[in-house]
Amino acid sequence: MTITEIQNDIIDEFSMFDDWMARYEYMIELGKSLTIIDDAHKTDDNIIKGCQSKVWLHAELKNNTIEYKADSDAIITKGIIAILLRVYSNQSPQDIIDANTSFLDDIGLKEHLSPTRANGLVSMVKQIKLYAIAFQSQLN
């Protein structure tokens, strides 16, 4: 699936919920299904700066696509990173670089997070894109 198709699926899924408590519960469930990164990758180098809670993000280039793995010590944050990895993991670096993030506004995520969590969301997206830029330069 393309990034846009995945984003549209997520928008559709979030539109099924009437209120934000149900959406938070859904994000928590998504976080529980996250493929956890290996403890060997839970290093200070892999911590995303700018997040209130700890978020570790590891990326590997495999067959010209990036495989991301992550974990967090907070359940909501774990759900947020699970959504992001669903969108960006196993995509090409260039597609990740080119992808817009308007789906986050479409599902209302930014406006329903505390300011510190919203800053963390921006930091997560930024780090995902930075990995893509680094891997894209290796491919060129």
Image (tube, helix red, strand yellow):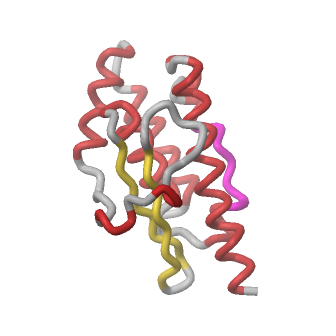
Please state which of residues 88 and 77 is positioned toward the viewer in this rendering: 77
Q: Position of residue 130 (x, y in %)?
A: 67, 60
Asked where in the image residue 104 lies, by quadrant, the reply is top right
* In the displayed structure image, the side of residue 87 where residue 133 appears, left or right: right
Q: Is residue 119 above or below residue 131?
A: above
Image quadrant in which the C terminus is located: bottom right
Q: Is residue 63 visible?
A: yes
User: How many labels were placed on the picture?
Assistant: 0
* In the displayed structure image, the side of residue 44 where residue 102 appears, left or right: right
Please state which of residues 94 and 67 is positioned toward the viewer in this rendering: 67
Q: Is residue 97 above or below residue 105?
A: below
Residue displayed at 57% across by 27% down: 118
Please state which of residues 55 and 99 is positioned toward the viewer in this rendering: 55
Residue displayed at 62% across by 65% down: 131
Residue displayed at 24% across by 37% down: 29
Q: Position of residue 101 (x, y in %)?
A: 64, 43
Q: Is residue 23 magenta?
A: no
Q: Position of residue 93 (x, y in %)?
A: 64, 71
Asked where in the image residue 86 lies, by quadrant, the reply is bottom left
Q: Is residue 6 visible?
A: no
Q: Is residue 130 above or below residue 80?
A: below
* In the displayed structure image, the side of residue 78 where residue 115 appears, left or right: right
Magenta region, residue range: 97-103
* In the displayed structure image, the side of residue 72 where residue 121 appears, left or right: right
Q: Position of residue 30 (x, y in %)?
A: 29, 42
